[in-house]
Image (tube, helix red, strand yellow):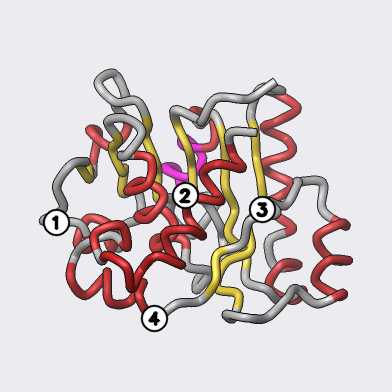
Amino acid sequence: MTASLPRRLAVLNTKGGTGKTTLAVQLAAGLARRGRTRLGDLDPQGSAAQWCATVSGWDVAQGERAWQDDDVAHLVWDCPPSVEHAAAGRALQQADAVLVPVLPSPLDLWASWQLVDVIQAERRRRPTLRAWLVINQLEPGSALSTAMHDALREFGLPALRAVVRRRAVYRTAALQGVSVYELGPRAAAAVADIEAVIEEMQT
């Protein structure tokens, strides 16, 4: 049976530098091709809102409007980098699914233990909550190390088979205030990465 895509997706990690905002922006852009989508920028830094100030076809919201999904098919939350932040806690309680981007290093993965415990506690309270780890910023052409595979198995959250590789085109998109979907053939590999993540969340 095929699952539906989450209506409310929280992109969350308590560790900085995992590419959380980049992933949230690109996922929102990909989901916008499937239905009206809003990116809720909950991070006090406001990076997603600055990035997408001129984007068309979907909208970026801050403040209370970032929480409203009555007129959208998908709502993606770029969460603060702290599970103790009130906005992150609220997103976790209201989300249909949580995506945790982790760097392809066991040490970086272990830094997410506390967050995984919090997500698992919420899943016990709400068994319908779906959650995944996703490897982000994997070097092009490289495979996950045996150590990383072993580390992933230690966690109670499933890891997506799809991975998002480190690509310069994401920086280009940020500088231009667009998503990789607007950059044509040079961004085809990046788009394929994001599409693979979206498709796997639907299975």
Task: Please give the range of residues in magenta.
Answer: 85-91
Q: Nearer the viewer, mark 2 or mark 4?
A: 4
| Residue 87 within the segment the image draws in magenta | yes
Q: Mark 2 to mark 4: distance in Å?
A: 31 Å
Q: Mark 3 to mark 2: distance in Å?
A: 20 Å
Q: Nearer the viewer, mark 1 or mark 4?
A: 4
Q: Earlier in the sequence, mark 1 or mark 4?
A: 1
Residue hosting label 1: 53
Q: Residues within 10 Å of mark 4 (few under 14, many from 20)?
A: few
> Which secondary structure lies at badge 3?
strand
In the displayed structure, 133 sits above or below 143; it is: above
> Which secondary structure lies at badge 1?
loop
Q: Amino acid at mark 3?
A: Leu
Q: Mark 1 to mark 4: distance in Å?
A: 21 Å
> Which secondary structure lies at badge 2?
loop
Q: Is residue 138 left or right of residue 1?
A: left
Residue hosting label 4: 168
| Residue 143 within the segment the image draws in magenta | no
Residue at the image point whose x is 32% and y is 68% from the top: 185
Q: Nearer the viewer, mark 3 or mark 2?
A: 3
Q: Amino acid at mark 4?
A: Ala
Q: Mark 1 to mark 2: distance in Å?
A: 24 Å
Q: Earlier in the sequence, mark 2 or mark 4?
A: 2
Residue at the image point whose x is 21% and y is 41% from the top: 58
Q: Earlier in the sequence, mark 3 or mark 4?
A: 3
Residue hosting label 3: 133
In the depicted view, which residue is nearer to us: 77 or 27?
Answer: 27
In the displayed structure, 166 sits above or below 155; it is: below
Quarter containing the N terminus = top right
Residue hosting label 2: 85
Q: Amino acid at mark 1?
A: Ala
Q: Earlier in the sequence, mark 1 or mark 2?
A: 1
